[in-house]
Image (cartoon, rainbow, N blue to C red):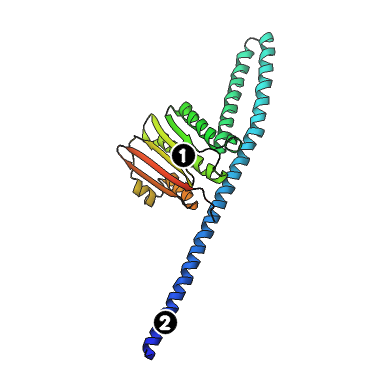
Amino acid sequence: MTDRTREISEQVARITAENARLLDRLIETERRFRRISRGVLRVQEEERAKISRDLHDGIGQSLTALKIQLELMEQEAGKAQEKLAPRIGAVRELAESCLAEVREMARLLRPQMLDDLGLEPTLRWLARTVEERTGVAVALEVSVGDSVDPDAETLVFRLVQEALNNVVKHAGVREARVRVKATPGSILLTVADEGSGFDAAAVLAGTEEEKGFGVRAMRDRVQSFNGRFQIESSGKGTVLEAEIPLEARE
């Protein structure tokens, strides 16, 4: 081997070694980013849970006490002044409406049943709530058992919640289909409708930043779990699919 050939070989070896080091650093950086992303999502959910408890235990209890006092005043006023009683009754009804809205906000921020009962009952509650609130029927098929870890449960719930919100707001349909199934290694999610559809590629590419933020956020959440996210849409409807690994993650 000539000196020139040896020099080239040594340069190639140095470049190869440097590329290997850079690749290792890139992989480690990506792992750190995913850990940070999951940490941020966990903190967000903890903050949602705190706000939900504050709404329920603080404002909710105050409104409950107000409603009780108004009921008592309504009973007393009914005996003394017939004109005052209806006005107190109207205020009581307003307090009841505010109480119902606060409780609904608390549940949607972070349903306590997700922690207490698990994913299946919470998804069934969400499906009923969407139908009652919007008139959009949700055909739900869910089979996850007790094997899903809390972070994955939260992710699946948020994906279904956001996807159904999009159906209600944009699809222009009266029915959506949701399928959630756990396998030994992952949890599979599908949300489909037969609505007007949209340009999924453009939304995911972010060419219009003010549009599609929710869809991109769903994709980013799934990717932070090393999962797979896919959405296809046309004039015949939209199908969102996600696969979240359940094996141990970094």
Q: Residue at x 47, y 53 (%)?
A: 226
Position of 159 compared to 2: left or right? right
Q: Amino acid at mark 2?
A: Gln
Residue 23, compared with residue 80, is above or below; it is below
Residue 247, compared with residue 14, is above or below; it is above
Position of 207 compared to 214: left or right? left
Report the residue that reaches farthest toward the front. Answer: 184
For the residue labelled by badge 1, is the local secondary structure a helix, a strand or a loop?
strand
Question: Looking at this view, is 192 or 246 the one in front?
Answer: 246
Q: Position of residue 19 (x, y in %)?
A: 44, 72
Quadrant containing the C terminus is bottom right
Q: Position of residue 238 (x, y in %)?
A: 35, 39
Q: Position of residue 15 (x, y in %)?
A: 43, 77
Q: In terms of image quadrants, where is residue 195?
A: top left
For the residues carrying marks 2 and 1, which lies nearer the camera in this image?
A: 1
Which residue was labeled with disc 2?
11
Position of 118 compared to 221: left or right? right
Q: Position of residue 223 (x, y in %)?
A: 46, 52
Check whether the beta carbons of the residues at disc 2 and disc 1 lie within 8 A of each other: no
Q: Amino acid at mark 1?
A: Lys
For the residue labelled by badge 2, is the local secondary structure a helix, a strand or a loop?
helix
Q: CA distance from mark 2 to mark 1?
A: 53 Å
Quadrant containing the N terminus is bottom left
Q: Residue at x 62, y 35 (%)?
A: 55
Circle 1 packing at 10 Å, graded few (<14), some (14-19), many (20+), is some
Question: Looking at this view, is 185 or 24 the one in front?
Answer: 185
Q: Residue at x 40, y 43 (%)?
A: 241
Circle 2 packing at 10 Å, graded few (<14), some (14-19), many (20+), is few
Q: Residue at x 40, y 79 (%)?
A: 12
First-in-chain label (2 vs 1): 2
What's the mark number on residue 181?
1
